Amino acid sequence: METINDNWIGIEEAAKYMGVTKETIRNWIKKTD
């Protein structure tokens, strides 16, 4: 059986990658229903 390794990144890494702030990402998460 193969182990699947999901590479989850933190909000800080995501923010840096997308060129936005952590607050922006938190707002996106809040907006999603």
Image: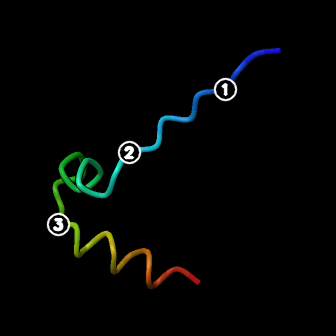
Q: Secondary structure at mark 1?
A: loop
Colouring style: rainbow
- Nearer the observer, disc 2 or disc 3? 2
Q: Is residue 15 left or right of residue 1?
A: left
Circle 1: is it few (<14), some (14-19), or many (20+) Cα within 10 Å? few
Could you say which quadrant of the image residue 3 lies in? top right
Point 38% across, 75% down: residue: 28
Could you say which quadrant of the image residue 26 lies in? bottom left
Rendered image: mark on residue 21: 3
Q: CA distance from mark 2 to mark 1?
A: 16 Å
Sequence-first tag of 1 and 3: 1
Rendered image: mark on residue 9: 2
| Location of the C terminus (image quadrant) | bottom right
Q: CA distance from mark 1 to mark 3?
A: 30 Å
Q: Which residue is mark 1?
A: 4
Which percent across, then down, holds residue 8? 46, 43
Q: Residue furthest right?
A: 1
Sequence-first tag of 2 and 1: 1
Q: Mark 1 and mark 2 in contact (Cβ < 8 Å)? A: no
Q: Label 3 amino acid?
A: Thr
Which percent across, then down, holds residue 10? 34, 51
Point 16% across, 54% down: residue: 19
